[in-house]
Amino acid sequence: MFQFLLRLSISVLFISWVVGSLVFLLIHLVPGDPVAVMLGDWASPADEEVLRQQLGLNLPLWEQYWVYMSNLVQGDLGQSLFYQQPVSELISQRFPFTLQLTLMALFIAILIAFPMGIFASIRAGEWPDHVAMTVSLIGVSIPNFWLGPMLILLFSIGLGWLPVSGAEASGSWILPSLTLGTALAAILARMLRASLLEIYHEDYIKTARAKGLSATAVYGKHALRNAMLPVVTILGLQLGTLLGGAVITEVVFDWPGLGQLLVDSIQRRDYPVVQACILVISMSYITINGLTEMVYAWLDPRIRLAK
């Protein structure tokens, strides 16, 4: 188990370095001058040069990369060019909102997916199964940037039940969480149904039925527990995807999370903030994948013995 965790930790560190390097290089290849954006169109070349030297943007790219990586190892994400405050403070202010939105979307997805997937597997081939799979297919196909405005038109503008945007009002998390969790619910429901249908044909399920166990014991204790392995994998991968997908949803609902901060910083050419936002989202994805692999290895010892 120790060797498995050691290899997993080394892989996470290596991938983190690759992601950090790619983020730095890609951001600096994007057209646009942050100094010109900050000073405006009427700034003199001398003022631009002074500010460029203060920010270290006059250094060669390799030297900027060395400074960036050195600071990153020390936990220093740099100074925002626009907000003029440490990037770590901006991240610490915005990340809880993104985390809240992601966890609520995950809760809604599980709340929808598990009853739908279990019921569809029990009634496989019948009309409830067809209805559930059709609904899940629609859920996968609808993009967030369309579903979000439709929910706003219906529940906020039409019925007046929920706030349109922001995070201050009561219940403001419901519409963005529902928008973000719908696609995940559809994916989980289809995966759970397929996994359960495969488990139902195993010999131990037939033995449990032959012993006269109740349907709750057969489906809940035996079948569902063993069907969770692929579901846990998909859940972990999709949880990381939720963090990235929250960017669009946060913009639609003006949610004050990392996604909104990232889009605003891209428009302002605020390199340190953009790099930090992408890096935090990427690191969250990597960390979640690593934890998912640990949970998977704990559920199925064959995984860690094979590595």
Image (cartoon, rainbow, N blue to C red):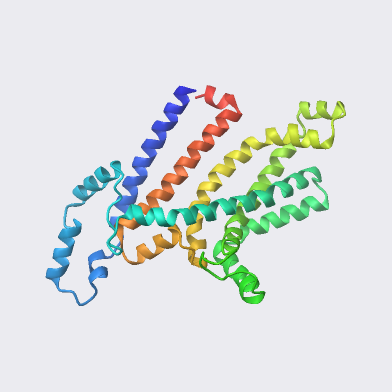
Residue at 36% of width from left, 57% of height from top?
A: 90
- Residue 49 vertical position relative to residue 20 in the rendered view, above or below: below
Residue at 58% of width from left, 39% of height from top?
A: 233
Q: Is residue 258 left or right of residue 121?
A: left
Q: Residue 146, percent across and down?
A: 57, 67
Q: Residue 294, percent across and down?
A: 52, 32
Label count reads 0
Q: Is residue 33 visible?
A: no
In terms of image quadrants, where is residue 224? top right
Residue extending furthest left? 46
- Residue 146 vertical position relative to residue 211 in the rendered view, above or below: below
Residue at 28% of width from left, 52% of height from top?
A: 78
Residue at 60% of width from left, 70% of height from top?
A: 152
Q: Is residue 31 visible?
A: yes
Q: Nearer the viewer, residue 215 or 121?
A: 215
In terms of image quadrants, where is residue 30? bottom left
Q: Is residue 273 left or right of residue 225?
A: left
Q: Residue 243, percent across and down?
A: 49, 52
Q: Residue 268, percent across and down?
A: 32, 66
Q: Is residue 103 left or right of residue 122?
A: left
